[in-house]
Amino acid sequence: DTEVTQTPKHLVMGMTNKKSLKCEQHMGHRAMYWYKQKAKKPPELMFVYSYEKLSINESVPSRFSPECPNSSLLNLHLHALQPEDSALYLCASSQDPDRASNTEAFFGQGTRLTVV
Amino acid sequence: RKEVEQDPGPFNVPEGATVAFNCTYSNSASQSFFWYRQDCRKEPKLLMSVYSSGNEDGRFTAQLNRASQYISLLIRDSKLSDSATYLCVVNHPNAGGTSYGKLTFGQGTILTVHP
């Protein structure tokens, strides 16, 4: 079962709202990722969690706050977003971030976020 | 120079054609290489990993040239269902070389297969 589940699938929020995106995997993977994808562009890495610890933050603005409560769950807390933050937010997981092999990532269906 | 570069296309080919995509990467410490496919408004899905000796999966053949830092994907006997964006993905270590969690995507190559 190579399934990564994201909720919600769609989200519309105002610039003063606080919301959270959720991601879950039960494959025993120890790396989890947040990517942002704008239309007609490739996914851009935002954060990497390795063994439940934040290992990579690609200089993401603080209005995006990741959280990894346990090895199966990954959240992205959103606060005071701007309209240009509207995008598809993709969660992914991979088996073992400390190995050079077996690093293929499996993606959830994404949350399509619109900031108004 | 971008970390992963692909010809964005678009490639517009008839059914049954053979089409090749190319990709180059800049970080010589990169260790793992993949091709993903992404359909419109869907998530990327792993098509195949790319191994040093080259590998084949049905109509798809992937090649890796570490010396030239070059990856390729060949699709034979194209089907209408092959129409998608093909993404070259490279995994390279963090600055300290202790983690390989950073997957970087090329900009994608758009393929349209027509009847």
Image (spheres, rainbow, N blue to C red):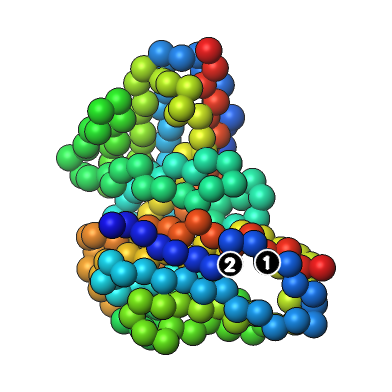
Establish if A9 lies above or below A73: above
Q: Relative to residue B78, is residue A113 drawn left or right?
A: right
Q: Which mark is residue A8?
A: 2
Q: Secondary structure at mark 1?
A: strand
Residue B15 in the image, given as x and y percentages of width and height:
46, 14
Q: Position of residue A48 (x, y in %)?
A: 43, 74
Asked if residue B6 shows in the view, the reply is no
The amino acid beneath tag 2 is: Pro
Q: Does residue B85 sit above or below B30 in this rendering?
A: above
Label of residue A81 in the image: none
The residue positioned 35% from the left and 42% from the top of the image is: B47
Quick one: A12 or B91, which is closer to the camera? A12
Residue type indicated by callout 1: Leu
What count of labels does the image hold? 2
Query: Element at badge 2?
Result: loop
CA gap between label 1 and label 2 equals 7 Å
Name the subunit of mark 2: A
Q: Which chain does the numbered disc 1 sit on? A: A
Query: Residue at image x 36%, y 84%?
Result: A70
Which residue is label 1 attached to?
Answer: A11
Where in the figure is residue B62, as x and y percent of width and height? Answer: 29, 36
Out of A29 and A26, give the one closest to the viewer: A26
- Residue B14 x, y percent position in the rendering: 50, 14
Residue B20 location, quadrant: top left
**Do marks 1 and 2 both belong to one polypeptide chain?**
yes
